[in-house]
Image: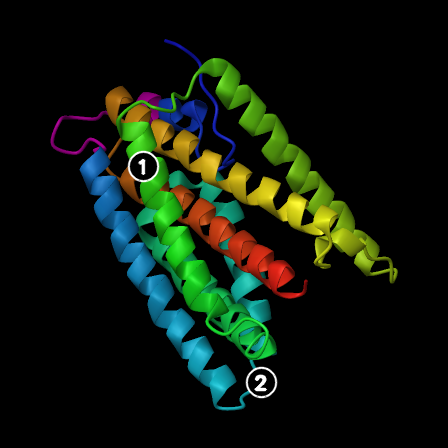
Amino acid sequence: MELFKSGNPTLSEKRFKDTVLADVVTHENAMTVRGTLQKFGFLFLMVMGTAFYSWKEFAGGGNVQPLIYIGAFGGLVVAIVLMFKKEWSPYLAPAYALLEGLFVGAISAYYNFAFAEKAPGIVINAVGLTFGTAIGMYLLYSFRIIKATEKFKAIIFTATAGIAIFYLIAWVLSFFGISIPFLHEGSALGIGFSVFVVALAALNLILDFDMIERGAELGAPKYMEWYGAFGLLVTIVWLYLEILRLLSKISKR
């Protein structure tokens, strides 16, 4: 069997193979691409529900900081648990979606307020661009215009790991009052960096679609549909947040 990788750490061939070896899977209880996409749609609706709640809280003058922390750190904990307990996906994937919605809604409301004059409609534009990019990547993958070759996977995986480490370092430095200017400024370097990260997040979708398709081919158990939908949601949220950051930088010029 050909080895393959995903830039998304929640989706990998080993994770799907492990479930096939651990469970006796029949055709009726096997993972399918359609089932995974349907569950992704359900998770996305849950994200939208709690995001709307956070948005309304911010608009009403409420303190949304607790929602941001609960959503961000709660979602991180659930995601880490899910990576080791895939069989809990039918229960934890919805929990992750609800928590992530709290975070995304509050952050979106903040951007909408902060850039109301310089970039009115920044959130709507970011949502539209995220949808458009995701659909475009799906079509490019479906028609095999972009193929998830071994070399392609290795490059995207390495670049994604590099960005993750860089963000972690920047986060740690922030506790010591040290900031990396181009992460937030609207300079040519700052915008160029954000364009690169947005492109990287978009290309991760190609790998995610490939992982889900291969997982179905391997005959992974039915609960892996929830796990695959969760992994895809992680990338979609990342893509949206990076597009939001990019639009905010452009508005500063």
Q: Quadrant of the N terminus?
A: top left
Q: Is residue 25 magenta?
A: yes
Give the magenta part as a residue range.
19-32
**How far across and how far down the image is residue 209, in percent?**
35, 33
Residue 76 visible in the shown view: no
Q: Hey, which residue is sitting farthest top in the picture?
A: 1
Comparing 17 with 246, the one in front is 246
**How far across and how far down the image is residue 173, in percent?**
83, 54
Q: Hey, which residue is sitting farthest left in the picture?
A: 28
**How far across and how far down the image is residue 63, in percent?**
58, 85
Q: Is residue 110 magenta?
A: no
Residue at the (55%, 28%) spot, across then down: 156
Q: Main secondary structure of the magenta part?
A: loop
Residue 87 in the image: above or below residue 46: above
Ranked by sequence position, the earlier of labels 2 and 1 is 2
**Image-quadrant location for residue 118:** bottom right
Amino acid type of the residue that numbered disc 2 sits on in the rendered structure: Asn
Comparing 88 with 33, the one in front is 33
Which mark, residue 138? 1
Amino acid type of the residue that numbered disc 1 sits on in the rendered structure: Tyr
Q: Hey, which residue is sitting farthest bottom in the picture?
A: 61
Which mark, residue 63? 2
Quick check: 188 left or right of 40? right
Closest to the camera, between mark 2 and mark 1, is 1
Q: Secondary structure at mark 1?
A: helix
Quick check: 140 left or right of 111? left
